[in-house]
Amino acid sequence: MKVKYILGVLSGYRPSFQRSALLVRNLAEASSLRAWVQQQLVDVSWLGPTQRDALVRLAHYSTRIEGNPLTLPEVEALAAGKDLQVEERAKREVLNYFAALRWIWRSSLKVIHEADLLKLHRLLTQDILSANEVGAYKAQPNAVFAGGQIIYRPPPPELCPELTKELLKWLNSSDSLNEHPVIAAAIAHHRFVSIHPFMDGNGRAARALESWILFRREFDTHHIFALDEFFDHDRQRYYREIQAVRDRGDELTSWLEYVSEAVIVTLQKTQQRIQTLRAKGSDTRITLNATQERILQALTHSPLLKGSDLARTLRISRALLSKAMRPLLDARLIVKEGSTKAAIYRLKTSG
C-alpha cells in the first residue's frame, strides 16, 4: 500500500478544489432540503424526537467508525440516562461524545480558536487517554493503519500545533466564513484528520468539528441530522475518499462531492423522519420563541429535568420558565410529571 505524507510545508493553508458541476448540483439540492426543514419549524411536534435521534446517531456512528461495539439501542439507552453493563471504554466513548456535542450545541462560538479545539478533544477523550494526552497535541509520531499496514503517515509532532493553527486561521477567515457551510465543514473535516494532531481521537474530533461548523454557520441550526451514519454505512468508501485526496496532492474536489452527497442522503432521511413524526404527532401548530427552543434543546440533552434545574440551566426565572412552558405543554410537546415545585419535565416520546 502507498504511504502518503503531504503536510510538511508550513506556508499558510489555502484549500484546493474545483466547483465541479456535480458539487454545485449537490449543494443546490442540499440547500433546498435544508430550506424545507426550516419551513417545518412552525409545526414542531417532530423537533424534540428528531434532535434526540441526531444526538444518538452522531455518537453511535462516529464512535462505531473507530471500532466502538455498542449497538444503536444501547447508545439510545445511554442517552436516556440508563446505566448499562457493557465494556467501560466503549460506554465512556459514547458518553464523552454526548458531552462534546452538548457543549458544541450550547456554545455561542462562531470563531473557533485553538483552545476550543483542544477542549473538544478533552471532552471526547476524558478518562480514555492518559492525562498527558487528553486535550494535548501528540508528543510522539503516529500513523494510520489498514489491514495491519501503514497507509498514511501524518505530520510529526513538532509540526502539528502550527498546522492546526493554520487550519483555524483559514477556518476563521472571510474566505471560509463566506463559503457554503457544507464546503467549509467538509474541508475542516479532511484537513484536521490529515494533520492528525492527537495520539488518538482524531477521527471523532474531525467529525465533531464538522458538526460544529454546520451548526454554528446555521446550516443545521437545530442539530437534527447526523452525517456520520452515512460515513459508517460504507466505511471503506469513507476511508478511500479521505485517502484519494491525499493521493492527488490534497486536491479536495472529490471529497467535497462525497460529503455533499452525504448531506443530501442524510437530509432526505431527516425529511422522511419529520414527515412520519408529524403524522403521529399533534395537530397543534406553534411557532417557537428563543426561550422555547432552548427548553426543547435542554430536554433533548437531559432525559428528565426538574423545573428548578431547567430554570437554572437556562438562566431564567421560574416565572419566565412557566410562561414559556405553557404553550409547549398545551401542544403536548413536553410532558409534566408530578405537581408543584417537585414536577419533572421530559419530551413527549415519538411513539
Image: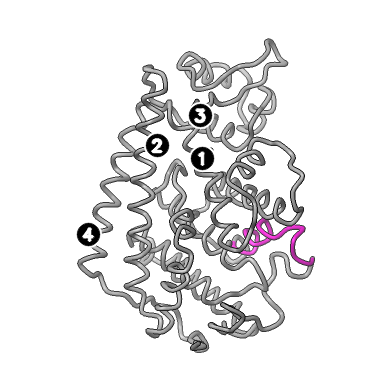
Q: CA distance from mark 1 to mark 3?
A: 22 Å
Mark 1 or mark 4, which is nearer the start of the sequence?
Answer: 4
Q: CA distance from mark 1 to mark 2?
A: 10 Å
Q: Which residue is mark 4?
A: 25
Mark 4 or mark 2, which is nearer the start of the sequence?
Answer: 4
Mark 3 or mark 2, which is nearer the start of the sequence?
Answer: 2
* Disc 3 versus disc 4: nearer the observer: 4
Mark 2 or mark 1, which is nearer the start of the sequence?
Answer: 1
Q: Position of residue 121 (x, y in %)?
A: 64, 62
Q: Residue at x 56, y 48 (%)?
A: 107
* Disc 2 versus disc 4: nearer the observer: 2
* Left or right of residue 274, residue 19 in this image: left
Please tell me whether residue 129 belongs to the stretch shown in magenta: yes
Q: Residue at x 61, y 74 (%)?
A: 197
Q: CA distance from mark 2 to mark 4?
A: 24 Å
Q: Mark 1 near mark 3, Cβ–Cβ under 8 Å?
A: no
Residue type (three-letter) at the residue carrying disc 1: Asp
Categorize mark 2 by other alpha carbons within 10 Å: few (<14), some (14-19), many (20+). some
- Choose between 216 and 344: the one closer to the eye: 344
Q: CA distance from mark 4 to mark 1?
A: 28 Å
| Prevailing SS of the magenta stretch | helix
Categorize mark 4 by other alpha carbons within 10 Å: few (<14), some (14-19), many (20+). some
Q: Position of residue 126 (x, y in %)?
A: 73, 58
Q: Which residue is mark 2?
A: 273
Q: Which residue is mark 1?
A: 53
Categorize mark 1 by other alpha carbons within 10 Å: few (<14), some (14-19), many (20+). many
142 above or below 127? below
